[in-house]
Image: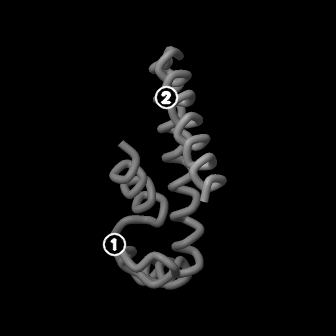
Amino acid sequence: MLQKIRGRISQEVGKLILIILVGCTTINEGSIEEAKRQTRLDVVRACENDIFWGLISDYPLTDYTTYMIWLEMGGTGPSPSEFCHAYAQEVVR
């Protein structure tokens, strides 16, 4: 029981130290925008991969192959890349 309390106190002290350290640092706006840009790229890559394997239920077609066949038959609509870029913009603000 005592060890559990010590562990909990240690966690709380660690959190407070982290809050103090974070509060003392300056945050460069450029680095935040760069992090957002990189996150958007990661989301787009993951989205395109999921579309290729047919894992995204929001995408209007079941998978990339079905999309390509549909496109060759004269269909219109967002490409996987357009869909994923719009999705990433919506998710990462």
Q: Residue at x 66, y 53 (%)?
A: 3
Q: Could you tell me residue 16's position as x and y percent? A: 51, 31
Is 24 left, or right, of 73 in this rendering? right
| Image quadrant containing the N terminus | bottom right
- Does dot 1 land on a helix, a strand or a loop? loop
Which of the pair 42/6 is nearer the observer?
A: 6
Residue where numbered disc 2 is placed: 19
As drawn, the residue found furthest toward the front would be 2
Q: Which numbered disc, 1 or 2, marks the residue that appears first in the sequence?
A: 2
Residue 35's place in the image compared with 64, above or below, is above
Instruction: Give the colour scheme shown.
Output: one colour
Q: Residues within 10 Å of mark 2 (few under 14, many from 20)?
A: few
Amino acid beneath label 1: Thr
Q: Position of residue 51 (x, y in %)?
A: 52, 73
Q: In this rendering, is residue 38 above or below 81?
A: above
Secondary element at image label 2 = helix
